Image (spheres, rainbow, N blue to C red):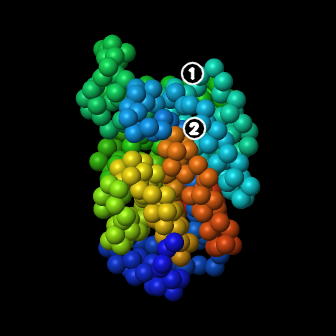
Amino acid sequence: MDRTDHSTRREFLAATAAGVAGVSIAPRAKAGEGDQALIAITLDLEMSRNFPDRSDTHWDFEKGNLDDRAKSYAVEACRRVKAAGGVLHCFAVGRVLEQEDVSWLEGIVRAGHPVGNHTYDHANVLATRAEDIQFRFRRAPWLIEGRTPAEVIRDNVRLATSAMKSRLNCEPAGFRTPGGFHDGLRDRPDVRAMLREQGFGWVSSLYPPHEAPRPLEEPEPAVFDSILRAQAQAQPFVYPDGLVEIPMSPISDIGAFRTGRWQLEWFLKAVRLGVEWAIEHRAVYDFLGHPSCLYVTDPEFRAIELICDLARRAGDRAALVGLESIAERARKRER
């Protein structure tokens, strides 16, 4: 159990926001006037190395070959968020649409949950060398022979969109980069231009830096403090060319359970602090999860239920939304 009492936590949240240099948090406004906390639950639909067993590394070469447990987890997570009055935003690796049965993903779309583009092969969009694009192409370089890294990446994004149109009969709801980058796409106008050319108005690529957890050790207060400070940096903004950035909120399930090898209770504490901070400051919280990790580490959906419960208890001060709603508010504030 977390021993931090409510009054102390509120003081800590306020002090943290005030102490983060260069971060602008919108002033509080009356709820219902566009200044609610916007809480997003997002799941990247891909397989993850080290899950379900620590020795599993073959998923690096078949990121889109989702197993039945990952697919079932995604479906149930979507059902729970919809029951709480929100939507869950998924990002699909295109290769999953090569599987014979995609009815589970069709059901997610029919239920009103947005599904975005996560490239076809889980490609690194910042790669400038062929060997850095994806493990699959390192093993089978003939698949991309004769093309530059930029051409391969552009085509990988296009293929995922084409697969979604063909098998799901829908356009992708935004784009998330495989992997999160500390500066997002600030220094890569070429990648931003490529995404805009393919019709994307927003991207989720930035994952703010924070203190790394020590494996198997209960996080010290300084670790949670660092994660919460990073949350203040994980707020949407607009690049000079008009592309909206929607950062991912720390700490991700992969960071907690693969890198830190955390216990679930430690992860839940970090999630709760981040959501409460967003509600306190009418800000954004973008939960980053992976069903292939969570079905092992959180089989009872406690993180998702926690987020839904915190949003419900906040009343009209918060809303469970997809990332398009967050992008639209960022555009309005920029204007």
> For the point 30% across and 58% down, which residue is it?
214
For residue 200, above or below residue 134 = below
Q: Position of residue 252 (x, y in %)?
A: 44, 53
Image position of 76 (left or right of 128): right
In the picture, residue 55 is in which quadrant?
A: top left
How many discs mark residues in the rendered view? Answer: 2
For residue 269, above or below residue 205 = below
From the viewer's side, name the closer residue of 87 and 189. Answer: 87
C-alpha distance separating marks 2 and 1: 16 Å
In the picture, residue 238 is in which quadrant?
A: bottom left
Q: Position of residue 281 (x, y in %)?
A: 51, 75
Q: Position of residue 108 (x, y in %)?
A: 68, 40
Q: Which residue is mark 2?
A: 70
Amino acid type indicated by mark 2: Ala
From the viewer's side, name the closer residue of 266 and 276. Answer: 266
Q: Which residue is mark 1?
A: 98
Amino acid type indicated by mark 1: Glu
Q: Position of residue 83 (x, y in %)?
A: 74, 55
From the viewer's side, name the closer residue of 180 and 302. Answer: 302
**Circle 1: element type:** helix
